[in-house]
Image (cartoon, grey):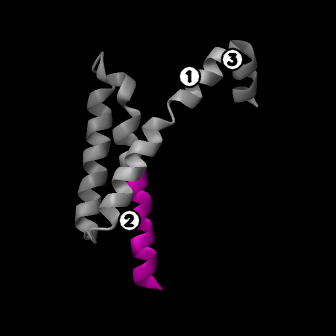
Amino acid sequence: MILVIIIIWKGKVMLRNTLGSGWGVLLPGIVIALMSTMGLSADVWRAVIVCGLLLSGGMIWHRQLRHFVLLPSCIALIGGIVLITMNLKLMG
């Protein structure tokens, strides 16, 4: 509800900027999809998640790189999803 109010309040400019950042999710998704075909171990996926989280934390303090903080955070998120699905496959 709050998001709808903000979008209405800001107008079309905010909606256009929000949709413009979709590449920040698609690009890491493609990278992770390519990495998942390599058959990496769970330890490598954990390292990918840690690197993504550390890069996100470091990039948020940098003046020019903070606009791209979505890239490593999405790598960490999608890497975590891949790790969860790997664990579910091993259990089942």
Q: Quick check: marks 1 and 3 in contact, CB under 8 Å?
A: no
Query: Residues under labels 2 and 1: Cα distance?
Result: 31 Å
Residue 61 vs residue 82: left or right?
left
Region in magenta: 76-92
Residue 64 vs residue 1: left or right?
left
Q: Residue 73 in the image: x percent, y percent?
A: 38, 41
Residue type, label 3: Lys
The residue tagged 2 is 83
Q: How crowded is mark 3: few (under 14 residues within 10 Å), some or many (20 or more)?
A: few
Q: Residue 56 in the image: x percent, y percent?
A: 32, 35
Q: Is mark 2 on a helix, strand or loop?
A: helix
Q: What element carries label 1?
A: helix
Q: Is mark 3 on a helix, strand or loop?
A: helix
Which of 89 and 13 lies nearest the eye of the viewer? Answer: 13
Work out which quarter of the rendered image holds the N terminus and state it: top right
Of the residues under marks 1 and 3, which one precedes in the sequence? 3
* Furthest residue in direction bottom, as rendered: 92
Q: Residues within 10 Å of mark 2 (few under 14, many from 20)?
A: many
Which of 13 and 42 lies nearest the eye of the viewer? Answer: 13
Query: Residues under labels 1 and 3: Cα distance?
Result: 9 Å
Q: Residues within 10 Å of mark 1 (few under 14, many from 20)?
A: few
Q: Is residue 34 magenta?
A: no
Q: Residue at x 31, y 33 (%)?
A: 57
Q: Nearer the viewer, mark 2 or mark 1?
A: 1
Q: Quick check: marks 2 and 3 in contact, CB under 8 Å?
A: no
Residue type, label 1: Asn
The residue tagged 1 is 17
Rendering quarter of residue 4: top right
Rendering quarter of residue 39: bottom left
The residue tagged 3 is 12
Of the residues under marks 2 and 3, which one precedes in the sequence? 3
Q: Residue at x 40, y 57 (%)?
A: 80
